[in-house]
Structure formats: C-alpha cells, structure tokens
Image (spheres, rainbow, N blue to C red):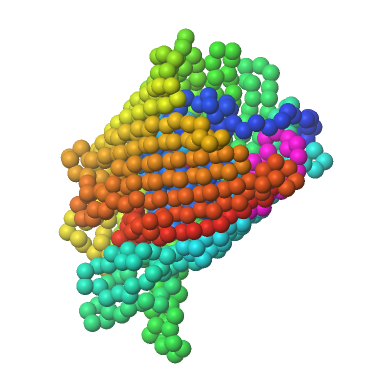
C-alpha cells in the first residue's frame, strides 16, 4: 500500500508543479456535494466553527449534542462518541475531510476520537440514507470534520488567530493558535492547540455506588482529568488546473479513566485501591496527500486522497504506596499495561462524470488496517488482525421538473484475517464479506410554503475485527468480551420522510424514520452470569432489530430592540427493540431542546435548555435513568482593533442548575455522571 502511495504521489505532484497558476477567491461549501450548504437536500446539519468555538472546549460528540437526532455516548467529560438516531459505535463514522478517521475509538466506548476540532471550518452531520455516499457501513450516519489544512484555493491574505479559555468546573485552561497564508505561491497552514483539564466537579451524591460498597464522597470525580496537544501542518499549490497538497496531524492525549471495573478478589483478600491512578495515553499521527485535476472530456475532474494513520492507546495503572510495600509493588506489576493499536492506509479516487443534466460521480476506495489489543502481562485480548476494504460506488443527482433526486450505489468487499485462542488452541480465520448498499432521496416543493423529502436505503455493514475476534477482558465496560467469527453482515432497511412548512415567519419541520436491521450485532451478557476472573462474559451476538423515531422543530426570527432573536423549539425521540419485543440496551431517551439566540451589532447572547426525559425502556439487567435539565448560557462581544470584529470575548456557563445528570447511553452512567456547574471565559484574537 505504501508503494501505491509513492506512485500516486509522483503521478499527481509532477503535473501540479508544472501547471501551477492562480485561482479565484475561496468560498465555504460542503465537502461532499461541492455545492453551497443551502443547496443540500439530504438530512444534514452544518455547524460553523464560530457557532461552537465560543462555548468552551469539549469533545466532538459533546459539541453536537444539542442537535436534533444527535447525542453523545460519553465516558467522562473528555471522552465521547456520537450517536445518531439511536445508532452508535461502528454504525456512525467520523470523517475528516471526507475520509474515515481510522483510530482506536472503534475498539471501545472509553477511547477518545483522535481529532482536533480547534480552528476547523465546520462540522457536517449526515443522517439516514444519505450516509452511504461517504462511508461503508454507516447505518446511522456520518460526522465529517472539515478543515483548511490543505487549502483547495489560494489563500489571499495572511491570517493569525489566537484563542485562550479558562473553565471553573475542572480548573482547566485551553489555548489554540493557527496561521494561514501564502509564501511564494504556496499556501501554508499551521495550527496548534493544547488543553489541560483537571478532575471535574460533580454535584453532591451524583455517583451511584453498588449496595453495601464502602466509599468516600468527593466533590469531584477522581481520574476524570485530561490533557491534549494537537498540531496540524499543511502546504498546497493551486491553479486553474486544480490543487495538490500534503499535511501532517499529530495528536497526543492523556485521559484519566474515571471508572474501571476490577476483578473480584478471593474471599478475605479484598483491599481498597482509593489511591490507584488509572489513565490512558493516546498517540496518533496522520499523513494526508490530496488533490484534484480538472480535465476536458467525459471526465470533468479527478480528485484523490491518500492517508496513512498510526494510532495507539495504552491503558496503565499507577498505584501510590509507601516505600517498601512489596506486595503492592507486585500487584502493580500484575496489572501491566494494555495497548490498543490500529495502523491503516487508505486511498480514494473520485471521477466527476457530470454533464449538463446530471451530477454523476464514480468513487474507488482502498483501505487496509492492522489492529490488535496486547497486554503487557497475560494473553492478548485480540491478536493482530488485518482488515482490507475495497469499494466502488456510483452517485447520481438529477432533476425531474420540480423534483430533485439523489441516488447512490456502492459495492464493498471486506476481508478480515486473524487468529483466535481458545483452550490453548490457535485457529486462523480468513473471512470475506461482500456488501451491496444503495440509497435514494427525492425532494420537491409541493407549494411555495411546503417542501418534502423522502429517503429510502438498504445498507449493509460488515462486522468489525473486534466483533469477530475479540477474546479477553475489557474492564472499561466491565466485561470479558468475546467475538464470533460466525457473525454475518448487518442489513439495514431505512425509510425517512421529512416535511417542512413555512407560515409567515414561522417554520415547522417534521421528520419520521424507521430502520429495520437484520442481524443487528450487540453485546449479550451470559444468561447465567458466568464470569472469568471476576467479570461477566459478554458475547457479540446477532438478532433482528427495529428502530423508529421522529424529530420535530418550530423556529422563527424576530426583530427585537434593534437586533434579531432566533428561537428554536425542538424535540426528538427514538425507540429501539428487537423483533422478539425485548428492548435494545442504552437507547437515548426523548429530549426537548429550546434555543434562543439574540444578536445586536457586535453582541450575541445564546441561551439553551436541554430537557432530557427519564429512560425506563431498558434491556435485561440494565438500570433506568432519571430525567434532567441542562441550562447553558453564552454571552459574547466583538471588538475592532485592527479590522472588523478581530477580538471576541465570551463568557459562558454550562449546567447552570448544577443538576445531577447521567447519560443513559453510557456504559458507566451510574459511576460517571456528567459534570456539574461550569463557568468560563474565552477570547479569540484574529490578526
């Protein structure tokens, strides 16, 4: 694969250097459809960086948690993975500039997504049937992070940005600097961000302990601290022939693990470990090469992307004890470290074969990943596994009178090679999955005020290497996790209908979806509660499942005191059951979301309330959660120093009610509640 990279680099770089010319001014557009954001007919949210950068540093999933149909599966304030319409894990793909982020997050809900959202352009969320346009197996949808590390058009001026932030809930601080400009016809980009967050505060009695368990009450959650440093560097050359560029991204993180199941000890040998420090160190490095060339003929352009990712997470124990206590030293050695790795290469080529009547694209994709879970002491939880993916896709956008149709078809060949160890016997496995998926959406205006979109899809998702080959303790979810090589691909048949109606200045939006999934893969605890080394055995199993839900919102703008008030009231709900009537575990509860944004000249006030209902539709052995309300407020003002609005000061507060809140989708919702009241200050300076 690396040799393939070298060939393609030479093939595309040489013409770039020979044909270099100037290009027109840059405009922000969607990374997918090459059109203005307002022209996208698929169910999609587009969030500009300025819309969330003033509200305090957060995880990717937390920053989009107030969008209808989108929520967060957290493992503490510093780790979170997005949920779309009840779908989580490998059914929701995180992308960066159109390519899947291939880190170790897919190997566990307690693993951070290795992306930097500081100084980006926008975040795009695609839900439902449209998602196959951008990734295989994305039954729930995709989240795409768009940045300008590789500029596709010439940067016309040098811009330097500096941001700093302080928070009260974790005594934390965060800063970011970035630069974009051009030197001798080359576009340059540099960004560095750093955060240092201590243990976060929680409301009194927020942690739910096991009955009879001795414990101390804290005003904070131990081991909930985090640190991150991220550096991005890019260079590109553009012209009327297209563009060519290369970038590097390096991310280092350290996250405390706020809850980590412990093995049961023999009777009479129990011992508290209140001073035990459990943390995870994550290292990620990414090299990107991408470009596009404009042609004359049946092929309008050739766009390509090449990416190599090395991702490692090492979970470690550190116990504090008195000098000379040899027994504790021996116990520390027995814990050892567990290392999760995923190293991958990916290449993608997109041919634009559009004509005057239709937008048409052909997509070719190759990807290879090597992953493993290795312990310093003991048997590996997952022996080295290699996953190879090859894809061909065809996508069409066309108009019929007043109707617009998008159609996507993709064929994926996925191969997983690895070994399993059972009862000292090693077996080799070479598994093939051939997946065919399609999606279609039809959009039209039935009147001047009434618009509707109908989407249908049939999407197949192959099981991941973890679901197939895992066989070991995963203490973060308190399970001995066992994969199954007998798993088949999931097949999801989805339909959604969205209608919008505008009455004067008030807009009503309603969306209903139904998603039937054959061979839904889930983690099933052993019916008899069988344990290995103190943790329950849980097997990756399959059963047919059904999801349905809705999203409804009312929004409007009002002129108020020489300014503008934007109001949005929304609600979303999802129900997930197996076809035998049993509830699917960790389904997001219904929510009401209220948003009020007032702007006047250079002042902005953003007040939002998220009302989360109680969730009692639980799976066997799963506990329900109480409802809660999170009130957030942000006030910002811009000042002109050298140019218009180049300094912005923001005051923000989150969870102002200091509510006890726990995320039902979290594996550790009882032990790891959401953070308490947080007050913060942030400034952004642009020169």
Q: Quadrant of residue 87?
A: top left
Q: What residue is drawn where x is 30% and y is 39%?
A: 574
Quadrant in the picture for the N terminus:
top right
Q: What residue is drawn where x is 26% and y is 53%?
A: 626
643 lies above or below 673: above
Q: Quadrant of residue 251?
A: bottom right
Residue 11 in view (yes/no): no
The location of residue 407, given as percent across then percent down, is: 45, 22
Give whichever of 570, 401 is nearer the camera: 570
Q: Is residue 142 magenta?
A: yes
Q: Which residues are magenta?
A: 138-163
273 horizontally vs 226: left or right: left
Q: Is residue 121 magenta?
A: no
Give whichever of 400, 421 is nearer the camera: 400
190 horizontally vs 110: left or right: right
The location of residue 296, given as percent across then percent down, is: 69, 18
Q: What residue is drawn where x is 40% and y is 60%?
A: 676
6 horizontally vs 48: left or right: right
Residue extending farthest to the top is: 401
The location of residue 583, given as percent across then percent down, is: 22, 44
Residue extending farthest to the bottom is: 324
């Amino acid at each position: 694969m690396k040799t393939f990279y070298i060939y393609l680099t030479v093939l595309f770089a040489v013409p770039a250097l020979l044909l270099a010319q100037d290009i027109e001014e840059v405009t922000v557009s969607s990374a997918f459809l090459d059109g203005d954001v307002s022209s996208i007919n698929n169910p999609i949210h587009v969030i500009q960086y300025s819309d969330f950068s003033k509200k305090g540093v957060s995880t990717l999933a937390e920053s989009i948690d107030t969008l209808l149909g989108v929520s967060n599966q957290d493992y503490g304030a510093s780790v979170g993975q997005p949920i779309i319409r009840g779908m989580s894990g490998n059914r929701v793909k995180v992308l960066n500039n159109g390519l899947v982020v291939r880190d170790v997050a897919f190997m566990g809900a307690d693993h951070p997504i290795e992306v930097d959202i500081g100084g980006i352009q926008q975040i795009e969320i695609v839900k439902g049937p449209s998602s196959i346009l951008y990734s295989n197996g994305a039954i729930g949808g995709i989240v795409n992070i768009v940045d300008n590390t590789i500029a596709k058009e010439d940067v016309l001026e040098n811009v330097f940005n500096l941001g700093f932030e302080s928070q009260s809930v974790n005594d934390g601080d965060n800063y970011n600097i970035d630069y974009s400009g051009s030197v001798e016809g080359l576009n340059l980009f540099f960004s560095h961000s750093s955060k240092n967050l201590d243990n976060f505060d929680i409301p009194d009695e927020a942690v739910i302990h096991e009955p009879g368990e001795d414990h101390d009450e804290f005003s904070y959650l131990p081991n909930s601290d985090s640190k991150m440093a991220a550096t991005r560097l890019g260079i590109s050359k553009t012209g009327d022939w297209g563009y060519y560029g290369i970038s590097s991204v390096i991310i280092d993180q350290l996250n405390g693990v706020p809850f980590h199941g412990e093995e049961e000890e023999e009777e009479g040998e129990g011992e508290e470990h209140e001073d035990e420090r459990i943390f995870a160190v994550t290292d990620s490095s990414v090299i990107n090469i991408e470009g596009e060339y404009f042609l004359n003929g049946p092929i309008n352009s050739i766009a390509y992307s090449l990416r190599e990712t090395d991702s490692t997470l090492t979970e470690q124990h550190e116990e504090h004890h008195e000098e000379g206590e040899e027994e504790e030293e021996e116990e520390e050695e027995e814990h050892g470290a567990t290392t999760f790795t995923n190293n991958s290469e990916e290449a993608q080529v997109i041919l634009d074969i559009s004509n005057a009547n239709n937008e048409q694209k052909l997509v070719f994709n190759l990807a290879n990943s090597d992953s493993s879970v290795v312990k310093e002491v003991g048997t590996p939880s997952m022996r080295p596994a290699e996953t190879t993916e090859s894809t061909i896709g065809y996508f069409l956008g066309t108009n019929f009178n007043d109707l617009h149709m998008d159609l996507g078809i993709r064929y994926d060949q996925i191969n997983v090679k690895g070994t399993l160890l059972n009862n000292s016997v090693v077996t080799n496995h070479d598994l093939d999955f051939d997946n065919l998926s399609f999606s279609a959406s039809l959009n039209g205006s039935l009147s001047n005020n009434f618009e509707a979109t109908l989407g249908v899809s049939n999407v197949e998702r192959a099981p991941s290497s973890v679901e197939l080959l895992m066989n070991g303790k995963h203490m973060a979810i308190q399970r001995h996790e066992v994969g199954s090589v007998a798993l088949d691909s999931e097949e999801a048949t989805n339909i959604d209908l969205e209608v919008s109606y505008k009455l004067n200045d008030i807009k009503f939006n309603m969306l209903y979806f139904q998603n039937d999934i054959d061979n839904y893969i889930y983690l099933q605890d052993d019916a008899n509660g069988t344990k290995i080394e103190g943790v329950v055995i849980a097997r990756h199993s399959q059963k047919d499942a059904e999801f349905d839900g809705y999203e409804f919102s009312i929004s409007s703008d009002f002129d108020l005191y020489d300014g503008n008030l934007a109001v949005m009231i929304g609600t979303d709900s999802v129900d997930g059951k197996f076809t035998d009537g049993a509830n699917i575990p960790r389904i997001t509860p219904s929510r009401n979301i209220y948003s009020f944004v007032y702007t006047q000249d250079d002042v902005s006030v953003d007040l939002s309330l998220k009302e989360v209902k109680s969730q009692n539709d639980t799976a066997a052995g799963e506990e329900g959660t109480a409802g809660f309300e999170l009130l957030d407020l942000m006030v910002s003002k811009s000042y002109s120093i050298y140019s218009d609005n180049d300094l912005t000061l923001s005051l923000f507060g989150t969870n102002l009610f200091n509510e006890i809140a726990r995320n039902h989708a979290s594996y550790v919702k009882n032990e790891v509640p959401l953070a308490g009241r947080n007050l913060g200050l942030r400034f952004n300076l642009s020169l």
